[in-house]
Amino acid sequence: MTPDPTALLRPGGTFGDFTVVEELGKGGMGAAYLVHDPRNGADLVVKVMYPSIGPGDSERRFIREAEIAMRIEHPNLVKVYDVGRDPETGLAYMVMDYESGGSLRDKITEKLLAGERFSVREALAVVRKIAEALEAVAEAGAVHRDVKPDNILFDAAGEPVLADLGVAKVESDASTILTMSHMIVGTPSYMAPEHLLDSHNADCRADIYSLGIVLWEMLAGERPDSEATLPDIRARALRGKRIPDIRTMRPKTPRYVVELLQRMCDPKPERRFATPMEIVQYLDCWRDIQKRRFRTVIACTAAAMAIALATVVSIGVWLIRENLRRLDEPPPAEREDSPESEFSIPNGVE
């Protein structure tokens, strides 16, 4: 039976130099705790493994997550400071930044409860930042392999940060692939077809696919295969079937976003963006196009308004001049009728 993590780290107790504040969550391998560092007043997160798991591949993968994260510096990646085994409790642990803004999963749920979804602008802002983080991961020769809303957190300023490199693969070192050959590594609902069928051969394009599913979910409020079972997902991967068009859920989605999703989530990895940075470049290109279109519209509108204003002014000037001209003209002469003409008697009438 899995031990209760609260029996290991208790709120109010200590862990090394830290004061334990509260449990943040737990999973199959361990638990995460909010801790306070009295030396500098910082709030951090400590992840610990269940002691029942013991030394082995799981612990090595846990340590590898921290080591990968510690060597990749990027503002949109959760920063890891330390990893090791606590001498007093014997628990394997890692220490990382505390991101107080919650997860993307939380925000999707909050919006759904309020009857809302992410706007296109909000969703693309998240995707752009996470793509930049994935580029840093790729440049370090690694693949995240578990991009999903639960692993996208927000800091106090609302900036998205990518967390949990626990299933990451380091492409340059085959010895770091610690999972069994037929074991599914990651979350199937977000996996690229090639990742689902053979997780060891997944590269950064698999992370791009997963990020595309996250974008689809932000826009639609649910995953493309929210009702699918694992066999259904595997069957789709084997057939190379595309995910549904986002316009089935959100008809007014801009065309460039539809095309973005199609390229990110193409079943064939060679037809996707080659690197996460290409996503950023695509979004920047469309932003520039929209800016130019906006400037053109503004210029045309301003020109039309100027012409309209000039026309109104010209008409106004003409009317003023016409009125002034009429004022300068002498008044018409009065008709001089004889006083008796009004009462004159026609000829032949007595």
Image (cartoon, helix red, strand yellow):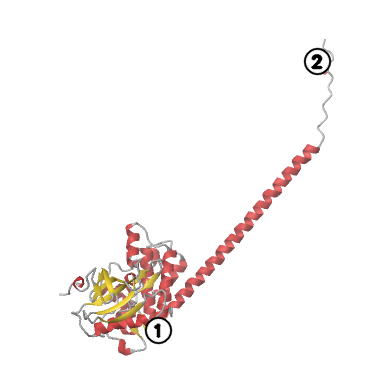
| Location of residue 229 with respect to 249 vertically, above or below | below
Three-letter code for the amino acid on which mark 2 is drawn = Phe
Return the residue nearer the eye: 87 or 309.
87
- Residue identified by numbered label 1: 140
Q: For the residues carrying marks 1 and 2, which lies nearer the camera in this image? A: 1
Circle 1 packing at 10 Å, graded few (<14), some (14-19), many (20+), is: some
Of all residues, the one furthest to the front in this rendering is 39
Location of mark 2 (residue): 343
Q: Position of residue 82 (x, y in %)?
A: 32, 80
Quadrant assignment, res 175: bottom left
Disc 1, disc 2: CB below 8 Å? Answer: no
Residue 163 coordinates in the image, percent (x, y)? 34, 74
**What's the CA distance linking mark 1 and mark 2?**
117 Å
Residue located at (84% from left, 19% from top):
338
Q: Residue at x 28, y 67 (%)?
A: 227
Question: In the rendering, which numbered label is found on residue 227?
Answer: none
The quarter in which the N terminus is drawn is bottom left
Question: In the figure, is residue 320 to the left or right of 15?
Answer: right
Q: Quadrant of residue 209?
A: bottom left
Q: Provide the secondary structure element on which disc 1 rests.
A: loop
Residue 109, position as x, y percentages in the image: 32, 62
Percent coordinates x, y for residue 57 in the rendering: 24, 85
Q: Earlier in the sequence, mark 1 or mark 2?
A: 1
How crowded pointer 2 is (Cα within 10 Å; few <14, some 14-19, many 20+) is rated as few
Residue shown at 47% from the left, 71% from the top? 283
Residue in the foreground of this view, choosing between 335 and 325: 325
Q: Is residue 95 visible?
A: yes
137 lies left or right of 16? right
Q: Quadrant of the C terminus?
A: top right
Three-letter residue code for mark 1: Ala
Judged from the image, the secondary structure of the residue bearing numbered disc 2 is helix
Q: Residue furthest left?
A: 1
